[in-house]
Image: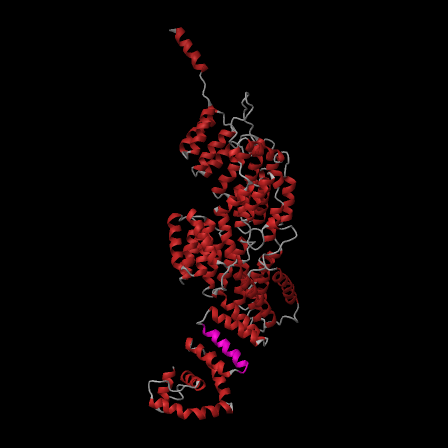
Amino acid sequence: MAGDSESSNTEGTNDHIDLSVYRKLVRQFIDMRRYSSALFWAEKVSVLSGHEPRDVYYQAQCMFLLGEFHRAAHTIQHYKLEKTSLPCLNLLLESLYAAKQYNEAANVIQIVEVETMTTSLINQPMDTASGIYLESNSVFGGEENNRNELLASIFLIKGKVFEALDNRGMAMDFYVQALHKSIYCFEALEALVQHEMLMAWEEFELMHHLPLAQQSTEADAKFILKLYESRLKKYYELISARNAEEISPIVNPDVLKYIKEFTARVQQTCSTDTQVPKPSASKVPMSSSQFMSPAQKVLDDLKAPTFSLQTSLSRASSMIDATHRSLFDASHRRGSRENDSDSLVPLNDCLSRVQRSTDLLAAEAEKCFYDCDYKQCLKILNSLLKVDPFHNNALTIQIACLVENGDFNKLFYVAHKLVDRYPDKAISWYAVGCYYDMIGKSDPARRYLSKATSLDRLYGPAWLAYGHSFANENEHEQAMAAYFKATQLMRGCHLPLLYIGVECGLTKNLELAEKFFLQAMTIAPMDVYVLHELGVIKYEYEYFDGAATIFQCTVDIVRQRAKANNEEVSARWEPLFINLGHSYRKIQKFEDALYNFQFALLLKPQSGNTYTAIGFIHALLGNLDEAIEYFHKSLALNRDCIVTSTILKDCIEDLMDDPGTIDEICSKAPSDVTESISASSRRVLNTDKLSGVKMNLKFEEEEEFSNSDSNMVVEMSFDA
């Protein structure tokens, strides 16, 4: 018996638990999304291994995947692994960010010096036979392959933390560092571009300074550049098609040259009092210091940016460690690809096939949207959304297109579909708010748009729409408050500046409005909406020659884009041609004014104001017959227009003062009256001039003739 027990104890001491089996089991459970089981075994492995960093990491990762962010952060901090392990530091920052502990995350960032960490990765045991890391697919699998990816991830989460703390200058710097650490860190580029952090030329500069040659092969560099440039702003040409000095918008070279000359002239007029007349006191009821101090502060902030791309790029270049990510990695990838020839695809085929990517289709649709080609934009989106019906960028563009086209029925369907599937996403309530704003219900629109901004405070389109809901009801202060917030969140976008300028113009603060429009032009120099609003401000300044110049240049761009899109000029540009016509009228170019008014009438035939404008031009040219005819047409569409009635009355008085007209009326009146008595079913008077007089009498002098004979009363009523 004693011998048996002794042999039993000996066998027990020789039994072992293979922790690698359980580690693989943990990763398998994670891949299968069985996080509770993974956490159970990960905690046991961590205890059995004496809390090795890799085991604590997987234990905390399981907690993170279960949504227990505070617990995951505490686990890492309890063992003080954030100062010795890059993966654990990255997971700690991710956990604190997900738990919205932004200040605590910022404290960790300040305490831990990532670049000076000596033991950044845990060296895993190697198989003595093969010399290969046992966990080559994990974040701990070899320092050469993963160090820079982990550093990029850490800089990325640093940027997210500081962006959440509204320190956007630091956030942009960290995002640039992340992209330099790894050119494959798309999230950093997405944050910079999607949140409108960079100006267009800064995006261009960033792309040209990416370490593509050091971190990829030549073919990979071309492929990556094509993908990344599709995410950039659509105001400029593709980067690959230009040299660094050729930063210019996509326009006709003649138009571009004209715009540059005009911009310089406009900036000169802003600084001189002789060229731009100052608005009168009646036009500016309040001074800028009394009413627009927040707007002036925004302009001052734009002049003193908190972020310098050149400084950030210099810092990123100095921090690159060529020993960890150099041609070694490129040759390593090339060698691994040669072992698997089935995965090799020719570059030209890749560039052709990737055009069918949903991301590139969304970028093409966005380009069409900025070019005002909404029909083609929706066509692309329809094919894209069949493949991926919940593509976030595509849905944002689709909502904007539906609002532009006034298709509230389709927008209603899109909004309800989003709310049913994704009630916790900002875009869902943004769509609902846009729908209610489109149908004229401002209160629910504001409520839902406010909810969208609370779900995602960085979602710029919701802030813009929120401002529109106030602007539609002339609540200028509230509208500008929303636009100011959008300006902070969308540094590289011209739209908040455009809308602030519009509100300043509506409040008659013309000087500030012009400054905002010029600031918007520095971002999007060829945006037709900015040019149009700048022309309106010039018109309000009574600088009619400059206004006509701006409007004419805008018309040229609109026509050029319509021709490029193989379509006619859209009816939405009718106000542009009207404004151009009035500007030409003010500088006494009546023929040009008449041409633009007539073109505007083609775009929108049932516009009483356009008929009035045409009639006024004919009156100025001395064509009183044509003027009276157009005034009649205008009053037929809008009989309550006092301006039209007044001008028509003056034209008739001038016409009646003409002796030739009186002789014509006297010679034709008796026969016309006889005809009206003998044939009651026919019109009373056939003379156009006299018919105009009778119609005018009906609207303007009805009380004066109310006691006239019955024949006159019947006659006016018939003409009406």
What quarter of the picture does the C terminus occupy? bottom left
| Residue 295 higher or lower than 330, as above or below | below
Q: Nearer the viewer, residue 270 or 285?
A: 270
Which portion, as a residue range, is magenta? 607-622
Q: x, y percentage for residue 476? A: 49, 64
| Residue 626 higher or lower than 124, as above or below | below
Q: Quadrant of residue 35?
A: top left
For residue 675, side relative to residue 251 (left or right): left
Q: Nearer the viewer, residue 7 or 204?
A: 204
Q: x, y percentage for residue 213? A: 62, 40
For residue 325, side relative to residue 366 (left or right): right
Can residue 247 be found in the magenta stretch?
A: no
* Image color mode: secondary structure
Q: x, y percentage for residue 335? A: 58, 32
Q: Nearer the viewer, residue 411 or 423?
A: 411
Q: x, y percentage for residue 217? A: 60, 38
Does the image show residue 181?
yes
| Residue 418 higher or lower than 526, as above or below | above
| Residue 242 higher or lower than 157, as above or below | below
What quarter of the picture does the N terminus occupy? top left
Does the image show residue 707?
no
